Image (tube, rainbow, N blue to C red):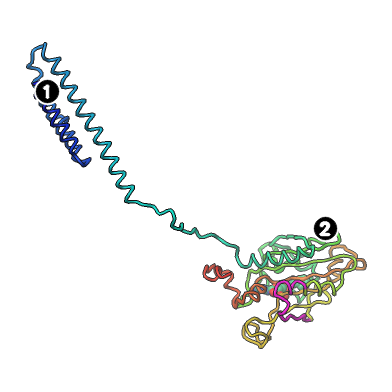
C-alpha cells in the first residue's frame, strides 16, 4: 500500500508538471484529490490494516496529499502568471499617442462682446451698477418722464406681471435707482437683460443692453459725443462709418441715436438694414431735468448724459451675424465660430 501511494504521488506530480492549462489542472485536482479521486480510493482500504500499520500508512497518505496539493498550487500560480504576462504583452498601450480631447465649454459670443464693452468703459473710469429685472412702473417709466398714458410708453410693448410690475423694457430704470441714492458725481455702466414684445431678424424679445450714466457739475453733450466716439472706434475700428442721428427719448434732451454702417450692404441699403444702409446700436442724450426732479437732484446744479446700447446689435455688426435669433438657438456650429 505504501508503494501504491508513492507511485500515485509520482504519477500525479508528473502529470501536474506537464499540464499547460488551468482547466486541465483543475481536472487533475479532482482526479487525484476529489471525493471519488485516486487518493481517496487508495486509502479506502485503511480500515483493514493492522493497528500498527494504520498510523504509518495514514501519515504517508497525508504526505502524499500535501505533496499533490503543493504541486497543484505551485502550477496554478505559474499558469496564472503566464496568462497575465500573455495578456499584458497583447494589450500594448502606446503612451506616445495623443489623448482624446474632452470638449470644453467656452464663453458665449454675447458675453464676450459684453465683456469687451465693460473693458472699454472701465478704461474710462466707469464702475458697474445693477438693478432688478422685474421693475415697478415708477422706475421703468414714471421717473423717466413717462407718466401714465404718456404716448412714449407705446414705444416699448411690455411684459406685465399680474401685480402691475413688469419685466424691465430697458436698463434706464437703473439710472433712477443710482440717482436715488443721492451720491454724486456718478459715472456708471449697467449691463443687463431687458424684455420687450418684439421679434424679427434684428429684434429679440429678450436682449441685452448696457446703460451708461454720467452726472456731475459740468457734464456736457460734447462729453457724451466724445465718449461714444471713443467707444465706437475701440469696438469697430476707426474706419467704420458711424452717424449721430437726432432722436427723442422722454428722459433725455437733446437726444441722439447712433447708427453704424450696415455690414451686409456697406451702406447701399438691404433687407437687414431696412434699406437705410445703417443699423442702430444705441440711444443717448443729456439727462432731462425732469429725471433729476423725480429723484430730488437740483437740475440747476447738476447736468449729465446717458446712453443705452444693444449688445446683440453690436455683436451682429462686429461679426456679420444676419439674424439675431442665431445667438439664442444654442447651435454649436454657430457658437464655435467665434
Ligand atoms: C432705449 O432702450 C433707451 N433706454 C436708450 C437710452 C438710454 C436713451 C439712455 C437715452 C439715454 P431703444 O429702445 O432705442 O432705447 O434701445 C436701445 C438699443 O437697444 C437700440 O439701439 C438697439 O441697439 C437695442 N434694441 C432695442 N430693441 C431691441 C430688440 N428688440 N432686440 C435687440 N436689440 C434691441
Left or right position of 258 against 36: right
- Return the disc, 1 or 2, that comes first in the chain's sequence: 1
Residue 266 in the image: above or below residue 128: below
Q: Which residue is mark 2?
A: 181
Residue 270 occupies quadrant:
bottom right
* Quadrant occupied by the C terminus: bottom right
Q: Which residue is mark 1?
A: 43
The quadrant where ligand 1 appears is: bottom right
For label 2, the SS is: loop
Q: Residue 292 appears at what percent x and percent y?
A: 86, 66
Q: Residue 202 appears at what percent x and percent y?
A: 63, 77
Residue farthest to the top?
A: 52
Q: Residue 107 appears at what percent x and percent y?
A: 60, 63
Residue 92 in the image: above or below residue 214: above
* Quadrant occupied by the N terminus: top left
Q: Residue 122 appears at what percent x and percent y?
A: 76, 63
For image coordinates 53% across by 59% down, the residue present is 104
Left or right position of 29 against 283: left
Residue 129 in the image: above or below residue 207: above
Residues packed near mark 1 inside 10 Å, few (<14), some (14 to 19) or many (20 plus): some
Residues tagged 1 and 2 counted as in contact (Cβ below 8 A): no
For image coordinates 43% across by 57% down, the residue present is 97
- Give the mark count: 2
Residues packed near mark 2 inside 10 Å, few (<14), some (14 to 19) or many (20 plus): few
Write down the region rendered in magenta: 230-245
Distance between the Cα atoms at labels 1 and 2?
105 Å
Residue 142 part of the magenta-drawn span: no
Residue 241 part of the magenta-drawn span: yes
Residue 49 occupies quadrant:
top left
Amino acid at each position: 500500500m505504501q508503494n501504491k501511494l508513492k507511485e500515485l504521488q509520482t504519477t500525479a506530480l508528473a502529470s501536474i508538471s506537464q499540464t499547460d492549462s488551468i482547466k486541465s489542472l483543475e481536472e487533475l485536482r479532482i482526479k487525484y484529490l476529489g471525493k471519488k479521486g485516486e487518493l481517496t480510493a487508495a486509502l479506502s482500504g485503511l480500515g483493514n490494516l493492522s493497528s500498527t500499520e494504520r498510523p504509518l500508512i495514514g501519515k504517508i497518505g497525508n504526505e502524499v496529499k500535501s505533496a499533490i496539493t503543493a504541486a497543484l498550487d505551485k502550477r496554478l500560480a505559474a499558469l496564472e502568471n503566464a496568462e497575465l504576462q500573455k495578456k499584458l504583452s497583447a494589450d500594448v498601450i502606446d503612451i506616445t499617442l495623443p489623448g482624446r480631447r474632452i470638449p470644453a465649454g467656452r464663453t458665449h459670443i454675447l458675453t464676450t462682446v459684453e465683456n469687451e464693452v465693460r473693458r472699454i468703459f472701465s478704461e474710462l473710469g466707469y464702475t458697474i451698477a445693477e438693478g432688478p429685472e422685474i421693475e415697478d412702473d415708477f422706475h421703468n417709466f414714471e421717473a423717466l418722464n413717462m407718466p401714465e398714458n404718456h404716448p412714449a410708453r407705446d414705444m416699448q410693448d411690455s411684459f406685465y406681471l399680474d401685480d402691475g410690475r413688469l419685466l424691465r423694457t430697458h436698463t434706464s430704470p437703473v439710472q433712477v435707482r443710482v440717482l436715488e441714492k443721492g451720491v454724486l458725481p456718478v459715472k456708471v455702466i449697467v449691463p443687463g437683460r431687458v424684455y420687450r414684445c418684439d421679434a424679427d431678424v434684428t429684434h429679440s424679445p429678450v436682449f441685452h443692453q448696457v446703460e451708461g450714466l454720467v452726472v456731475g457739475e459740468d457734464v456736457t453733450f460734447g462729453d457724451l459725443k466724445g465718449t461714444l466716439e471713443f467707444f465706437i472706434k475701440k469696438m469697430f475700428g476707426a474706419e467704420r462709418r458711424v452717424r449721430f442721428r437726432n432722436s427723442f427719448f422722454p428722459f433725455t434732451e437733446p437726444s441722439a441715436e447712433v447708427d453704424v454702417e450696415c455690414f451686409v450692404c456697406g451702406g447701399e441699403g438691404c433687407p437687414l438694414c431696412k434699406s437705410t444702409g445703417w443699423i442702430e446700436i444705441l440711444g443717448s442724450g443729456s439727462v432731462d431735468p425732469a429725471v433729476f426732479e423725480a429723484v430730488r437732484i437740483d437740475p440747476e446744479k447738476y447736468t449729465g448724459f446717458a446712453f443705452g446700447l444693444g449688445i446683440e446689435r453690436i455683436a451682429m455688426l462686429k461679426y456679420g451675424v444676419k439674424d439675431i435669433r442665431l445667438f439664442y438657438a444654442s447651435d454649436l456650429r454657430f457658437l464655435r465660430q467665434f
